[in-house]
Amino acid sequence: MKAFLLELKFRNETLFIFGLLCLAFAVLFLVMTRISQTQLYQVNAWYKPFKFAFSTFLFAWAMAWYCYYLPVFNVQAFNWVVIVLLGFEIAYITLKASQGQPSHYNNSSAFHSMMFSLMALAATGVTVYTAYIGLLFFVQDIPDLPVHYLWGIRLGILIFVIFAFEGFLMGGRSSHTVGLENDNSDLFIVGWSRKVGDLRIAHFIGMHALQVLPVLAFYLLKNTKAVWLVGIVYGALATFTLLQALKGKPMFPLHKEKKTTEITHH
């Protein structure tokens, strides 16, 4: 682990430090879920900034690692786009969590609508930049990388971009669930709805292809055809969860006994 951290810092110290800060904030927000009783959409309000900070930490470190391979790329420009845009998102989500108010889908005033739109623009900016980096991995010659690992990076970025843009489905509906408005459950930290379809599942699975596929390609698969096969299966899984959500069907439904108990208590 020490060797990995030193190598990552060498490759991109700026995103290395930013990722560490995001991880530190993620830990702080997780602690806040145990201290604060503030609820938002049926769950503790601090889970949302935790998930965004931790996800940004993973994204920053993954991209810091991959961009080093590109022979021609202005990495500092990308670094600061990531820091400014995703830093803004985390800061605003944290502010609204502290107030017990939603950051996303909040159109209660002109200000909140504007901030929601700015967050969408920030996410779009980072996603488009990442798509451009993915294109560079297709068109630039990178002879030192094993072909199977290169395809792991390519497919990981491709699936990430597709399912990052899936976020527009949620924004357009002003809800991450289909069947109920912004329903959450007590399903570990993710809080995915167990009553209706939840668009966040496909969003989560697809975006983390960015880490999963390159790691599998490098350490386990070590074969281009195998990487392609796993990439196709992985993308199909994310697509299946998206279609399941659009039908209003929960991925992890409540047991009938628990549903009956809830109805009785109501």
Image: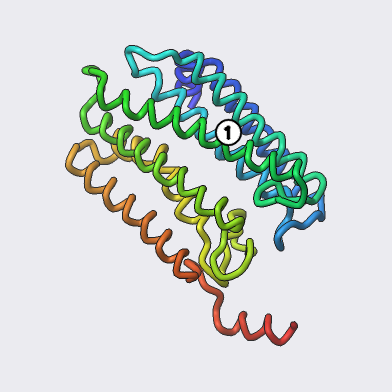
* Residue furthest front as drawn: 110
- Residue 244: name its quadrant: bottom left
Q: Residue at x 72, y 48 (%)?
A: 46
Using the image, determine if residue 230 lies above or below residue 154: below
Q: Nearer the viewer, residue 234 or 132?
A: 132
- Residue 255: name its quadrant: bottom right
Q: Quadrant of the C terminus?
A: bottom right
| Amino acid type of the residue tagged 1 in the rendering | Ala
Q: Residues within 10 Å of mark 1 (few under 14, many from 20)?
A: some
Residue 196 left/right relative to 160: right
Q: Residue at x 32, y 28 (%)?
A: 135
Q: Residue at x 63, y 36 (%)?
A: 118
- Visible residue check, residue 20: yes
Q: Residue at x 61, y 54 (%)?
A: 189
Tell me where residue 81 appears, x and y as whole percent.
Answer: 55, 23
Q: Nearer the viewer, residue 190 or 141?
A: 141
Tell me where residue 55 appears, x and y as whole percent.
Answer: 55, 39
* Residue furthest left as drawn: 225
Q: Nearer the viewer, residue 46 or 188?
A: 46
Tell me where residue 60 appears, x and y as whole percent.
Answer: 52, 28
Residue tagged by mark 1?
Answer: 122
Q: Nearer the viewer, residue 151 or 31?
A: 151
Q: Secondary structure at mark 1?
A: helix
Tell me where residue 3 appears, x and y as whole percent.
Answer: 46, 20
